Image (cartoon, rainbow, N blue to C red):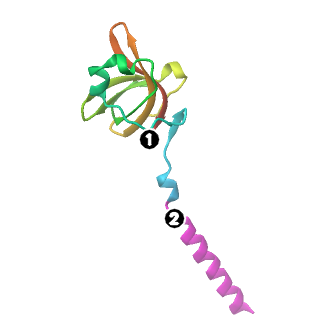
Amino acid sequence: NIKLIVVLLIIILIILGVSGCSGNSSNKSERYGVDITEKRVVSVKDIYGNPNEYLNQTIRLEGKIVRECGSGCWFFLEDETGKIFVDINPSGLSIPPKVGKKVVVEGVPENRNGRITINGKGVEF
């Protein structure tokens, strides 16, 4: 009887140990704001090169954060073609410090006093 209980306890511990090592939690992304649904990635160069095509249209950008506001309300996204300012404050968003991290942004390019910026609606790491 005691041997059976010990064997069952060992089996339970093995099952708990294996399930705890699955690593699924590390694959989860961090999301802020709206879910990113836009599939086509637009480059920074494309936005600057032909802003009228993208102004006031929802787009997807991918790159890394190279500079960020201390309170997390804006950042500069850089891809292989350039760098652009992303403002998430109008959407009521803020992110923790993420300089150097890869980021996906869904947002709307805007012309702010002759400067093209992104009004970020969703951010994912």
Q: How many angstroms separate mark 2 from mark 1 (CA)?
A: 21 Å
The stretch drawn in magenta includes residue 52: no
Q: Residue at x 51, y 66 (%)?
A: 21
96, above or below 2, in the image:
above
* Camera sees residue 45: yes
The foreground one among 115 and 97 is 115
Q: Position of residue 65 (x, y in %)?
A: 35, 33
Using the rendered image of the protein, determine whether residue 72 is visible from the camera's viewpoint.
Answer: no
Badge number at residue 125: 1
Say which residue appears at 55% left-offset and 65% top-offset. Answer: 20
At label 1, the amino acid type is Phe
Callout 2 touching callout 1 (CB < 8 Å): no
Give the farthest residue toward the left: 81
Task: Identify the image quadrant of residue 117.
Answer: top left
State the residue in front, 85 or 108. Answer: 108
Q: Position of residue 96 (x, y in %)?
A: 46, 34
Quarter of the figure that contains the N terminus: bottom right
Q: Please identify the quadrant where the C terminus is shown.
A: top left
What stretch of residues is rendered in magenta? 1-23
Magenta region, main secondary structure: helix
Q: Label 1's element?
A: loop
Q: Residue tagged by mark 2? A: 22
Amino acid type at mark 2: Ser
Residues packed near mark 2 inside 10 Å, few (<14), some (14 to 19) or many (20 plus): few
With respect to residue 92, does 124 lie above or below? below
Which secondary structure lies at badge 2?
loop
Image: 56 above or below 22: above
Task: Please report the residue visible at 24 percent of the width from the left and 31 percent of the height from the top.
Answer: 81
Task: Name the residue rendered at 30%, 27% in the picture.
Answer: 44
